[in-house]
Amino acid sequence: MSWLNSLYRRLNNHPYQTLALLFGVCVAVYVVTIPLPRSDGMLIGSDGIAYYMYVRSLVFDHDLSFADEYARLYPDIDVTSLRTATGLTSNQYAIGPGILWAPFFVVGHLVAMGLRQVGFPVGVDGYSYPYQAAVCLGSMVYGFFGIVLIYQTIKRFYPRTALAASLLIWLATNVIYYLLAEPSMAHMCSLFAVALLVNVWVSSRPEFSMRNCFVIGLAGGLVGIVRQPDATLLALPVVDCLLGRGGVLPRVKRIAAVVVGFALIFWIQMMAWQVLNGNPLSSGYFRDSTQRFFWLSPHLVEVLFSTEHGLFLWHPILLFAVAGLFYLGQSQPRLAVLFGAGILLQAYLIAAWWWWSQAYSFGGRMFIASLPMFAVGLAAVLQWALEQGASLLCWVTGLGLVFWNALFFLQYRLGYISHGGPYTLRQLTVGKLEMLLDLARRAVRLLAR
């Protein structure tokens, strides 16, 4: 027990090196898996393909006409059914990830051309592995900096447990899955953008200068162009600004600064909607009437606790984070209430969405934007536990939940449970042991050959 505490103290003295070392391991694991055979021959997949279309079209074609991308990436889709009022092919996904990936995509292009020059049969058309790998590694980089920003935010309140909470958010939730197994999804870009917003907001309290409010707006705009539902979180610092010090006029100026900052970034998404759909306020989601919110009948309990990707069932570490918000409330009552409100707001949006189970999802993937707020609560509950002399309980619980998440990772990735669900309680509990036994039997048979 003492050696674990001693190890943590050493790591806590070098937090950025610790986080960077773990990230290096993740990158190494990802790079090693690139040559593995894939049924579709693609490193990108699922929603990531639609996000990828943006960066490929912008860099190569300098437009938002996705005809070439659909022909190459979705050859079985009849694009005539996707024509918009402007004559282009619809893409309902946000433009932000494509923009964030652009520098990495350009590096991938340089790598592809270099490989081509020395004789490797690598395509230089924006579709081959160097481009896809560069984009995935770009997502991983953004996910890493999202964790760093989370650490910096927590450290303002709980320096003793900031590193532990950051590592648990990384390893005991779905961050590790979407950073390592499916980085072409938008979730690591989303984690980075929201972590930046929360960090800028918390760092600006309680004075909220005009400059800081403008930067909060810029960060909120970035959140909005990466994933529009996450932009609702900008309401939290706005409320905080309104409740801050000063009279009516200073408060109005603060909100105006936030709005201007937000508009300076979010106009990019609005212009993309204008080009694609003929209306700067018309998302591609509006084309399909089945994709909508059912505001009066949200599946709130199911989203949080059901076997179909229920957030707390898959990632019980977040239950401790919720409890920690109450402890945070003792020193930062307004912030604790706003964090709790932000998490509830995201839960309501997800629960009201027509596909509340979040489709093919490792846990509650749409909640990744809420993790920067959960993380502060997690650090708070760890701090409380240490003050009660329960460091052994913290170690046992934390490592146990990391192991629990790792077993989920293997179950999901190796096909022991379906990607879409629904699942049985047996699959999610005893099924983990059955998977380990099956893997052990396979290993024995392999060694016996």
Image: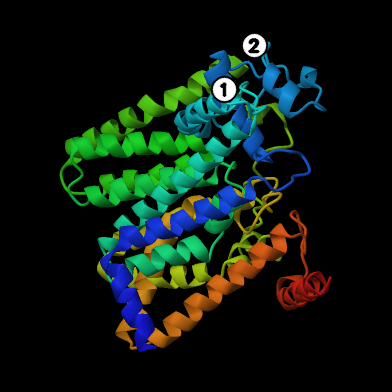
Q: Where is residue 420 in the image (x, y as percent from the top left)?
A: 75, 54
Q: What residue is disc 2 on? A: 86
Q: What residue is disc 1 on? A: 117
| Residue 227 seen in the figure | yes
Q: Position of residue 182 (x, y in %)?
A: 61, 48
| Amino acid tagged 2 | Thr
Q: Where is residue 404 in the image (x, y as percent from the top left)?
A: 60, 73
In front: mark 1 or mark 2? 1
The residue tagged with tag 1: helix, strand or loop? helix
Picture mark count: 2
Side (left or right) of 169 relative to 17: right
Image quadrant where one finds the C terminus? bottom right
Residue 80 lies, with reference to residue 143, above or below; the image says above
| Amino acid tagged 1 | Gln
Crowd class of label 2 (few under 14; some 14 to 19; many from 20; radius 10 Å): few
Front-lying residue, 70 or 286? 70
Crowd class of label 1 (few under 14; some 14 to 19; many from 20; radius 10 Å): few
